[in-house]
Structures are given as structure tokens and as C-alpha cells.
Image (tube, rainbow, N blue to C red):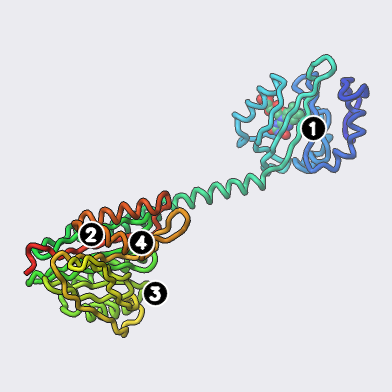
Amino acid sequence: MNINKNKYRSGVHLLSDAPIEDQLLLKDKALLVSAEGITISDNTQRDNPIIYANKGFERLTGYPVDRVLGRNCRFLQGPDSNAETVSAISEAVRNEREITVEILNYRKDGTTFWNRLSITPLRNDKGRVTHFIGIQSDVTNPRRAEDELRKTTQQLEAANQRMKGDLEAARQLQLDMLPEQTPSLDYLDIAVAMKTAQEVGGDYYDFHVNKNNHLTAAIGDATGHGLKAGTVVTATKSLYNSLAHHPDPVSILKNMSLALKNIGFRNMYMAMLIAKFTPDTLLVSSAGMPYTYHYRRAEDRVDEIILKGMPLGSFPDFDYDSKEIPVQPGDTFLFLSDGLLELPNEKGEQYGEERTRELFAKIAFDTPDRIVAQLGDSATAWSGSTPLRDDMTFLVIKMNSENTD
Ligand SMILES: Cc1cc2nc3c(=O)[nH]c(=O)nc-3n(C[C@H](O)[C@H](O)[C@H](O)COP(=O)(O)O)c2cc1C
């Protein structure tokens, strides 16, 4: 035990009637093995010198115990010790209050460590603070880990912000590629609505009108989300621009599929439906898009146009099917991406084909604008507070009653 009994004998009674040094001697064994530094200062002496330090303190600071006795503990501080923390300790000691701080301290060899320091006043039976007990723990590693974690979190947040910015730009690009308005043609009314998911979803639609006023409408959905989906949509848009005039939807799909495959998007495909309208017919072909709903006004009935096919970019030799359907005034078509069909409600149930068909059957007599609006409302009501995970696109085309010959 390194207390210099003669010099620092205080005669103050601590927990029992025995002098503090004797009590410490009793506790010495326990204190010796402590991983923590334990110090006791004598508040009755000028500048509150240390009168006891354990082996843990020696191990922590590198100062042999006999070199620290009689000194105020501030010798552990150095240029990078936080001045505000020092003031806080000073104030607590002056006001005889407990305090716990983390302070950068310097070892004998000049290296630094983070010291979690707790100082507790000890009162004698007259209530006077005669001593302070200081407990020093090395928290350098946890602090370093915390600093690292903080740094990593900041880096992640910055990367997240950048990615959000990129995704926002990609989303804008995707939206910019969509036609600003629907074509205006005598023999049909068109309305389209897209509800976009937070992430870039990859839905796409487009129109082309030839010199005979025949409409080619396209609706598509790139697999996956994000920038990759956005890139596939961009490629599809330029392919559509150059191929839409072709009279046969099957060859449009085949050519697009081959071109997308050749671009070399890995595992990125595009589901796509091409619908060619004249005043009397619809010629339609599909590469992996959901079924089309056809409201036949004459029979007041909704039929499904079922066309199966692999998405573009997967199997360029795939033999796509097409259907030619005679149309009547008042007939209405609903083309859609799978966003609505797969839309989950709060219980995780999908909106599904049946519900879509039933709703469309109820509202198909209405104008295309109102039909897409009602589909959107129904989707919102269904999903509730569940965030939209996929884009949803509704394209409604109605054969105009007055102008069809
Ligand atoms: C029992 C006790 C132990 C202390 N241990 C440390 C310590 O390990 N590291 C430190 O920086 N300050 C320690 N201090 C604080 C300083 O001794 C001193 O109180 C502080 O620097 C504020 O006072 P000052 O402004 O007069 O320097 C301790 C104080 C007491 C009373």
C-alpha cells in the first residue's frame, strides 16, 4: 500500500471509526485487483491532493503510485483536454457535488486515453466534505468505436442522400419520357394515369399516331426498380420511337426484344403490350403484360384478352401471339401494369384480377378520365397506409360513339 501515512494522515473518519487509511488498507486487496483507477483526495488540504491511488490507476496512467501522492489530479490533463469539461469538474468539486465526465487524459509516456471519471464527495459525521473518491476508467476503445460508428453513420447518410438524389433524377427522367399528353383522335378517347412508387418503378406508356390516324399505344413495365429499370425504360422508349410505325405488333415486340437482349442488360427485361387501333379493330400483342379488359358495350360485358408471352429481352425468338378484335362504338379497353393487381392491402392481400375486373365492369360506361380516376381511388382505398412498392399504370381507351363509322 502506497499511502504515506505520516504525511497524509488526515484523521478523518470515513465509514467507521477507523482512520481512512486503515479502512483503505482493509480494502486494499480488492482495490489492487480493480481494473479501474481509484483515487482519494484530501479536501482538507490545500489544492485537494491525492492521498491514495490504487494499482489500477498506476496501470491506467503509467504513473507509479508514489509519484502521484500529494499532487492534484489535474496533472493528467494536457493541451487537448476539453477546457469546458475541466471547468465542470472544478465547479462540481467546489460545490461538493458528484460528477461523471469523459475527459482526454495523458499518460506518463505522453499517450492519451479517454478517461471516464466519476468523482464522489465523502462527508464526515458533521456533514463536511473531507475527501473525494475518484474512479477512472479507460473508455478509449468504446469511444473510438462510437466515433467510428458516428463517422460511418455520417458517411452512410451522405451516401443515402446522394442515392436519393440520383433516384430522384432517375424518377424525373422516367417521367420526362412519358408523353405530355394523350393523342386527340376523333374515333377514340384516351386517358392514362400513373401512380408512382417511391422508388423508380419502371412503368412506361407511349403513343404513336400514323398518317391515317391509326393509333399505336404501348404500355410496359421493366422488371425490378431503381436506376436499372429506368435505363431499360430509356432504351425501350427509343426503340418504340423507331418501331411503332410498323403495322404488325408482333414484329415490333420481336425487334424490341432482340435489341434489348443485344444491349446486354443482365437480368433486366421489359414486359410490354402493343395495341394498334383503327376505328374498327384492335390488334394487340403482349410480351408478359397483364390481360387486357375489354368492355363490350353491346353486350354490357367485360371480356379478358388473354395473351401470353415472355418479357422483352429474355427470349428474342419467342413467337408472340396477337389478336385482332373487332370494336364497336362505346367499347372500352383497360390496359394496365401489374401494380394494381399485385397491390397489397394492410393485411398483405393483393388487389387481384377479380376485383379489377369487377370494378371495371361497374365503371366501364363512364368516360376514360373518370375510369382512371376511379381505379386510382380504389387502389388508394385498398392500400391504405401501405407505401406503394410498384408503379401502377392504367390506360383506358374508349371507342367514340359519335365518330365511329
Ligand atoms: C478524487 C479526484 C480524482 C480526480 N481524477 C482526475 C483524473 O483522473 N483526471 C482528470 O483530468 N482530473 C481529475 N480530477 C480533477 C482535477 O483534480 C481537478 O479537480 C480539475 O482539474 C478541476 O480543477 P482545476 O480547474 O483547479 O484544475 C480529479 C479530482 C478529484 C477530486
Circle 4 is placed at which residue position? 355
CB within 8 Å, label 3 to label 4: no
Residue 50 position (above or below residue 324):
above
Circle 3 is placed at which residue position? 266
CB within 8 Å, label 4 to label 1: no
Q: Image point 36% across, 51% down: which residue?
A: 381
Q: Nearer the viewer, mark 1 or mark 2?
A: 2
Q: Position of residue 233 (x, y in %)?
A: 29, 67
Residue 35 position (above or below residue 314):
above
Distance between the alpha carbons at the discs numbered 3 and 4 = 35 Å
Circle 1 is placed at which residue position? 39
Q: Tell me which numbered mark, 1 or 2, is placed earlier along the sequence.
A: 1
The number of callouts visible is 4
Q: Position of residue 181 (x, y in %)?
A: 17, 58
Give the amino acid at mark 2: Val
Ligand number 1: quarter of image: top right
Q: Which of marks 3 and 4 is in front?
A: 4
